Image (cartoon, helix red, strand yellow):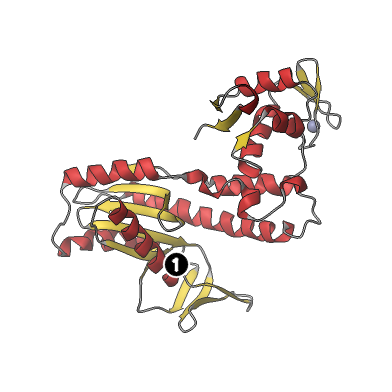
Amino acid sequence: MIIKKYSDSVHLEAMELLTRRLPSKHPIYHKIFTEIQTTRAGDYGERIVFRELERMQLPFKYFVFHRVMLRTEKVFEMDVLLLTPYGAIILEIKNITGKLEFQENPSQLIQTRDSGEINNYPCPVIQLTEYKYLLSKFFSKHNFSIPVQGAIVFATRKSFVKTTSSKATILYRNEIHSYLRNLQSHSPILKNSQIDLLKNLILKENSPFSYFPLTKHFFIDVSDIIQGVACPNCGHIGMQKIKKKWYCIQCHLKDSKAHKESLRTYFLLCNKYITNKACREFLQLNSRYEAKRILINSNLIKIGEKKSTKYTMKL
Ligand SMILES: [Zn+2]
């Protein structure tokens, strides 16, 4: 049963917003641009693997979650998590095409593209081992002792694994079903009621907004972020508030709600909290009453009173 459906990553959305609000000469611009490409390819891989999981029927109770972010010693995000009577299963999905070689000592994944271009990536085996460790830690922190297994899944047949690793299970997408069915060769460890408890724990502890604000994640100075309301039509940043509407000098759009997306951008990029002053600066408003009206009507959580009032986004 699918508990948490496939969803595009907020991280990707936030990185795209970030590139629009950073000067293209900014030292980190190129790095973010490259990360966007990698994340897009990764999202595509996750989407097609998840479709496979949605079609799947297993002869035991199971729950599937897409993209779960948990916190123990550090924050970690799993592509797919399954809860089964045989324990928890992490699937790390890779959408890296070409000829692939897993190397050890030092661990890395070498990709040779059809064009002959060679790239190396951090080894997914190391990543999976780390996530298995962190998930076990997470469960023990919550007083559960649960076996954690996992596999690396290549999303497409365009990935040709030439040299594999003895340290992890590596699957193609079409092998997931039999891999999971084979769990039955062991005795079940968890009762159905325990799987339900774990499901609720995961849903409660999943914190997808741990990456944010992105300026913190990428060590960018908040003052480098271009301020102003972005035009939903042409992307121009710096719409002007004229009477009750935002006006774009570039495409002449008039829109009364244009600030909404920019407020979300503020939370994803700049700060978890917004004050009246920060709102006036970011949306380029002159009136504190106008800023207050916007903050009150934006479905935010209000914290504090009077001068120390601040607002945060509902998750
Ligand atoms: Zn415009």
Q: Where is residue 73 in the image (x, y as percent from the top left)?
A: 42, 58
Report x, y in % for residue 177: 29, 58
Nearer to me, 159 or 283: 283
Tell me: residue 133, above or below residue 211. Answer: below
Q: What residue type is labelled 1?
A: Gln
Q: Which residue is drawn at 31% across and 60% down?
A: 136
Q: Quadrant of ligand 1?
A: top right
Q: Quadrant of residue 151?
A: bottom left
Q: Is mark 1 within 8 Å of ligand 1?
A: no
Name, please, the residue furthest toward the left: 187
Residue 190 seen in this snapshot: yes
Residue 70 vertical position relative to residue 307 in the rendered view, above or below: below
Rendered location of residue 5, percent (x, y)? 41, 42
Front-most of residues 188 and 113: 188
Left-right relation of 106 to 185: right
Name the quadrant containing residue 270. top right
Q: Position of residue 313 (x, y in %)?
A: 55, 33
Tell me if residue 44 comes above or below residue 225 in the rendering: below
User: Which residue ends up furthest to the bottom in the rendered image?
Assistant: 105
The outermost residue toward the top is: 243
Q: Can the viewer see residue 231? A: no
Instruction: From the image, tell me which residue sits under label 1.
Output: 127
Q: Crowding at label 1, few (<14), some or many (≥20) Cα neighbours within 10 Å?
A: some
Q: What element carries label 1?
A: helix
* 286 left or right, relative to 145: right
Q: Quadrant of the N terminus?
A: top left
Q: At 33% across and 63% down in the image, what residue appears?
A: 150
Q: Decide: is 171 above or below 25.
A: below
Q: Which residue is drawn at 79% across and 36% down?
A: 237
Say which quarter of the image contains residue 243: top right
Instruction: Identify the residue shown where x is 62% and y is 45%.
Output: 14
Q: In this view, does 282 lie to the left or right of 217?
A: right
